Amino acid sequence: MDTEEFLKQVPLLRCLRAEDLKSLSAAFRVQSVRKGDVLFHKGSEGTTLYVIKKGSVKIVLSSMGGDEVILAIFSEGDFFGEMSLLDGMPRSADAVALEPSQLLVLNRSEFLRFLKGNDEAIAAILNGLSMRLRKTDDHLEDTCFLNISARFAKKLVELAEAHGQKEESGFLIDMDLKQRDLASMVGATRESINKELRTLREKGLVATEGNKIRIYNLERLKRRIH
């Protein structure tokens, strides 16, 4: 699928007229990255918008000691990096490829030109930012009021619904997420996540294969969120 055809499917760009989309697609460049490649660091200058054509990217905050908190995971069709382009401030987090990925990259001047006079595109950007802020609020609420079992179950449900591959037996989360990654996403320790996974396996709700997680019963998993 060429760039123009792919961009027609991206929610941010669906509002564009055919001729505008054709012009904008020519401004994107393709960037291929390997698993673990850093796209940008917190504090670096924001000069580009990214759209994921293939693969997945995590947005993380890292400490001096090497610990990290995963703020979000983006996959095919998602965009990120727009905040620094809008406010001119440095990047607020790191962006790291979770797997070999192909990205479409748009520089700041083309991005701002795209937004100028395009009310529907601006609304799409604001909606995206609003949803991400709401997810941050939800995460803080979960950390305050849900125990680890409930937080972990909720995160698995979110990953399955947003990124899981539907199978006859359930959902496969094939994102190479290590236990420490899962722990950082729910504000827990790796040991706690290891224990939770063992419990879920014993109950027949999930199976693990390396860093892959297969969910057999999403509805029963949802009932653990309380």
Image (tube, grey):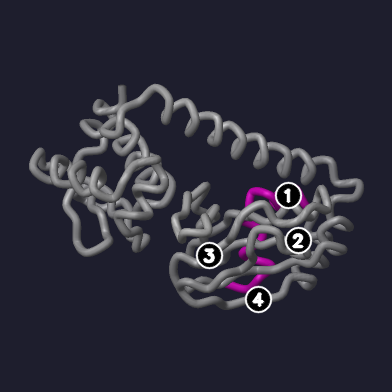
Disc nearer the start of the sequence (1/4):
4
C-alpha distance separating marks 1 and 4: 21 Å
Question: Mark on residue 13?
Answer: none
Q: Is residue 21 left or right of residue 138?
A: right
Q: Kindly report which numbered mark, 1 or 4, lies closer to the viewer in this rendering.
A: 1
Q: Residues within 10 Å of mark 1 (few under 14, many from 20)?
A: some
The answer to which image quadrant residue 6 occupies is bottom right
Residue drawn at x 39%, y 22% as measured from the top left: 145
Residue drawn at x 68%, y 56% as measured from the top left: 81
Question: Mark on residue 96?
Answer: 3
Q: Is residue 169 left or right of residue 76?
A: left
In the image, residue 133 above or below residue 26: above
Disc nearer the start of the sequence (4/3):
4
Residue drawn at x 69%, y 49% as measured from the top left: 12
Three-letter amino acid code of the residue under disc 3: Val
Task: For the residues labelled 4 and 3, say whether their Cβ atoms are less than 8 Å apart.
Answer: no
Q: Which residue is mark 4?
A: 30
Question: Mark on residue 46?
Answer: 2
Q: Residues within 10 Å of mark 3 (few under 14, many from 20)?
A: many
- Most foreground residue, 170 or 150: 150
C-alpha distance separating marks 2 and 4: 18 Å
Q: Which residue is mark 1?
A: 83
Task: For the residues labelled 2 and 4, say whether their Cβ atoms are less than 8 Å apart.
Answer: no
C-alpha distance separating marks 3 and 2: 15 Å
Residue drawn at x 16%, y 52% as measured from the top left: 207
Task: For the residues labelled 1 and 3, say whether their Cβ atoms are less than 8 Å apart.
Answer: no
Q: Position of residue 82 (x, y in %)?
A: 72, 53
Three-letter amino acid code of the residue under disc 2: Gly
Three-letter amino acid code of the residue under disc 4: Val
Disc nearer the start of the sequence (2/1):
2
What segment carries the magenta color?
Answer: 1-16
